Amino acid sequence: MDLKLKIWRQAGPTAKGQFVDYDVHNISSDASFLEMIDILNDELVEKGEDPVAFDHDCREGICGMCSMFINGHPHGPEKATTTCQLHMRKFKDGETITVEPWRAKPFPVIKDLIVDRSAFDEIIQAGGYTSATTGGVPDANAIPINKENAELAMDAAACIGCGACVAACKNASAMLFVSAKVSQFALLPQGKVEAKDRVKEMVAKMDELGFGNCTNTYACEAECPKEISITNIARLNRQFIGAKLG
Amino acid sequence: MTKIDSKIPAGPLAEKWTHYKEHQNLVNPANKRKIDIIVIGTGLAGGAAAASLGELGFNVKVFCIQDSPRRAHSIAAQGGINAAKNYPNDGDTVYRLFYDTIKGGDYRAREANVYRLAEVSNNIIDQCVAQGVPFAREYSGYLANRSFGGALVSRTFYARGQTGQQLLLGAYGALSKEIKRGSVKLYTRREMLDLVVTGEGKARGVIVRNLFTGEIERYGAHAVLLATGGYGNVYFLSTNAMTSNGSAAWRAYKRGAWFANPCYVQIHPTCIPVHGSYQSKLTLMSESLRNDGRIWVPKNKEDIEKVRSGALKPKDIPEENRDYYLERRYPAFGNLVPRDVASRAAKERCDAGYGVGNTGLAVYLDFKDAIDRLGKEVIKARYGNLFDMYERIVDDNPYETPMMIYPAIHYSMGGLWVDYELQSNIPGLFVGGEANFSDHGANRLGASALMQGLSDGYFVLPYTMQNYLADQITVGAIPTNTPEFDAAEKAVKDRIQKLMSVNGTETVDALHKRLGLIMWDHVGMARNKEGLEKAIKDIQALRKEFWEKVRVPGSPDGINIELEKALRLADFLELGELMARDALHREESAGGHFREEFQTPEGEALRNDKDYMYVGAWEYTGDDKEPKLNKEELKYENIEVKTRNYKTA
């Protein structure tokens, strides 16, 4: 395949960025999107130019590191797929592909396609855990959990923390991310003890860091590579109101 | 031969760990605040250790290479974690888990360490449940189990096909809690480039590169824990993440830490086959699939040509014309033989010309019988995410047509040498998880990596490091303005400068791919003397070429991905040679190390217990000198050493 790429290049956090056009040729349709960028970067290095900086690591769709905004979609057009698992067979020969970083105030661009997502770590630090310390806990089977709740908790826990939900949202809201973690613990008896403080502190941190409000456009759910359900946001709202009331 | 003291406590095997804890030194709560600990890596071992040490009250500085501790490569582990809970009532015990692990490792692991691993395995499951890890459950509400290779019981706990992710997020939660509390300080996007050892021979700090600013930073502490994973990326193509590398361990080696059994690497039997030269990594299909999938190749050569060209579909090959070679060769364990056995059997069939796929380097993993027996919905519930991942990569539907799989580099059993306390031969340098050589001998069983990482991190290192630190309370903060820190920092800066100034014509990846091919061809699934000697020469030549021809554009100040990769490759080019050397010296076949000269008439691995029942711990002696081999003899007092047999129960 031959492709035309329009890639966002930005030298540093305060530098002015711009789209730069590149042509790539003879790309196998079996290559992944990131392998296609690897090929471009190899050509740039051979010419002595600065390769395109982008985040990636496991390349199996689970670490949550990759984060390209491709043709107007976080992680590209394919549903339920991270950038690293997107393959070139999903594009047409000769197509022009636009690649940008996540665009959201709490995720500032660091270089090219790399953004700073440490805000997500800060939200988790605010309360996204149970406070069980190592040792002194009961036998695992002393806490039976009905299968349905365990499955729903697992659905929510599948979040990879990539930030696609924020990038997809016109308000840059982190509600889907926060609700996934709050839901995981709200559905499990282990999470009940600290449920009220958890939801209050995580929401307060999210607001403090400049994430926007949820206005129910469902863009986050549509673009989430792990198909985290918007019903988690409803659960978060119920938890939050419950915590505030009492 | 150097006499190696592995500090195994006296007493009966089952009481050693209790005995150790009863007699070890402790640090009182007020004094813990005066002690600094550096942890490199935030995977299961590093994340769990950092969190647990922080909870105890130590000052912990934790470093990760990614933008968040949640992205360490433990996250990609799919299938599960073993524990001897015996919830299914199928006959499991701590001893049986110990026995299976020693046997699976082909009698090349240390008894006392493995027994402790089996012993604390149950605590890990309890801990993770308390953290809210959403393990799979039965309708009763109790925990579910499944089987993995090399075991006759179901002892594997799992969270769909994302067990590593859920366990890591548990540890990440615990770590986040301590970061908030202030006991742990987090440093992201940092890569360790050297270990600082003081004049008295103690590990007292590290030199790291800030991958954003390019700054070289120094940090001091009373003890250093390396939990930096394995070195599978020496092969270029592996199931490891892109930044997984061997540099932290290698730099420790060059500062005097011994590197044990580097030739023991695990080749995982069920990965998606290689498809092109531009390929950047290989993707694993979880071993759990072997619970329900049957592995086969066509029995007749005439069918091979037709399936390779696409003229014949595998599902149209009748039962009598299929060779379920694992079930045929190993009736007792069938498709659930250990990984090294399954990988070699796949290679044997492909080498004999029975491989499928357009390259002939693939075998079928077929779910038709399981789908007929259990229904598609059950299979989907068990493996849905894996089937989806396969389809995304290969563009083929595994519910309709068998998966194609082939072995790939996955895990390193070898690593830095550690004693019973997980301390290297450098006092104050501890090593956890895949980065140490400790528990898996010559082959690791499935679902045991997660167990070992969390065992080391939650339940072993918080005790053993404390034992070491007990006499450090009067030392005071470790200064970093010393000649040792100056020298280590200068060495790092000089190495970077040297790389930047080569200004050659070859990209880092192009050179790395060439190293990968040498390693795969000669230090891969089957090895022999001639090939290993050739590999050593070829690696030396490639290393020379690297330092003459590598091209690293840009500047070392700020993000420079080519520089990062070049630094890692420079170390892989040395480590690869040591792996070949270790493989050459070990004139036997054991676990993942298969020497073609040493096999039974049936083609099974042939150990030489008389001459090689030891851990080979290599000691650095200088860049142009041969490393020195230290041997730790292995004694088996609680298990009868036998030839591994997976044919009969």
Image (cartoon, grey):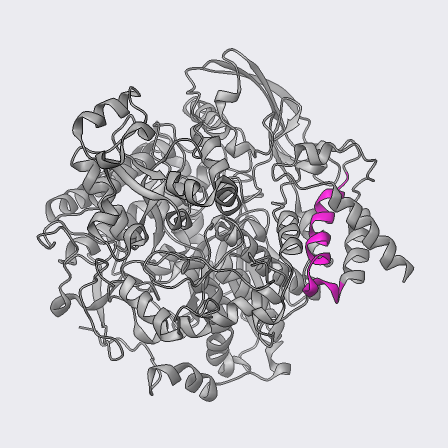
Residue B342 included in the magenta stretch of the image: no
Quick check: B286 left or right of B258?
right
- Depth order, front residue of B57/B556: B57
Q: Taking the image as drawn, is residue B140 in sight?
A: yes
Q: Position of residue A28 (x, y in %)?
A: 41, 20
- Depth order, front residue of B266/B257: B266
Quadrant for the C terminus of chain A in the image? bottom right
Residue A186 included in the magenta stretch of the image: yes
Quick check: B270 left or right of A39?
left
**Residue at far top of view:** A94
Q: Position of residue B26 (x, y in %)?
A: 52, 84
Q: Position of residue B369 (x, y in %)?
A: 37, 41
Quick check: B278 left or right of B541?
right
- Depth order, front residue of B630/B640: B640
Q: Position of residue B592 (x, y in %)?
A: 25, 54
Quadrant for the N terminus of chain A in the image? top left
Q: Which residues are magenta?
A: A173-194
- Depth order, front residue of A47/B65: B65
Q: Taking the image as drawn, is residue B553 in sight?
A: no
Number of numbered discs overlaid on the protein picture: 0
Q: Is residue B353 above or below residue B142?
A: above
